[in-house]
Amino acid sequence: MLYNTNTYSVSVSPSEKEKNKSVTDFRHEKERKMSFRSSMNAVPLLLFVLFVSALVCAKKTADVTELQIGVKHKPASCEVQAHKGDRVKVHYRGKLTDGTVFDSSFERNNPIEFELGSGQVIKGWDQGLLGMCLGEKRKLKIPSKLGYGDQGSPPTIPGGATLVFDTELVGVNGKSLGEEKQGSEL
């Protein structure tokens, strides 16, 4: 028996059609990657545009829709708190959102006195001063619906105005801060 010991090599070369398909596939893949990279480069620009748009919208709707309470100073001990029905004395400075001061008990050195929660003052005060400690200072941002509403309080407070009050609780049911502490600037 004789065996053929010759070695044959067979080379399979791709047809022209297969070559063109490979080149086309490569180009499409490269274009897809470049398109993806280009779109990724646009993301920071898109985020910037969205951020600026949000700022512009926020500025247009600067008026608050709910009562906002910020504590500016709270005494170390809070032995006396304001509750509904308490007789309270409050120093305040009332401003519009543009910073225009329309009233200030500090300037007159004469805090207002009223029964908390009884409707003697605007709703924003009745709500915003609840739980306040004697000697505490708060900043209240009051939407018009809890302030003077659409009618305002001419000539100083326009209709629909958001009000900002710097407040200091100086008396609760006859208990007062020491006279030296009352009316200190907020």
Image (cartoon, rainbow, N blue to C red):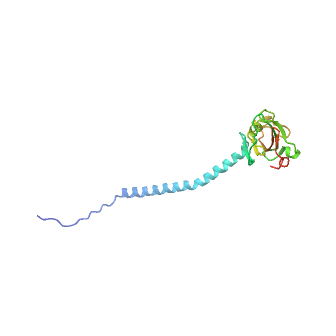
Q: Position of residue 69 (x, y in %)?
A: 73, 43
Q: In the current view of this chain or complex, which residue is farthest to the bottom?
A: 6
Q: Position of residue 159 (x, y in %)?
A: 80, 37
Foreground of the two, 141 or 128:
128
Q: Residue at x 40, y 55 (%)?
A: 21
Image quadrant in which the N terminus is located:
bottom left
Question: In percent of the image, x 36 and y 56: which residue is there?
Answer: 18
Residue toward you, 56 or 5? 56
In front of the other: 79 or 146 = 79
Q: Is residue 150 above or below residue 135?
A: above
Quadrant of residue 79 in the image? top right
Picture coordinates of residue 65, whole percent (x, y) = 71, 39
Q: In this view, which residue lies farthest toward the right? A: 108
On the picture, is 20 further left or further right than 78? left
Q: Against 41, is 104 above or below?
A: above
| Residue 74 rendering spot, x and y as whole percentages | 74, 47
Extreme residue in the left direction: 1
Number of on-image labels: 0
The quadrant in which residue 132 appears is top right
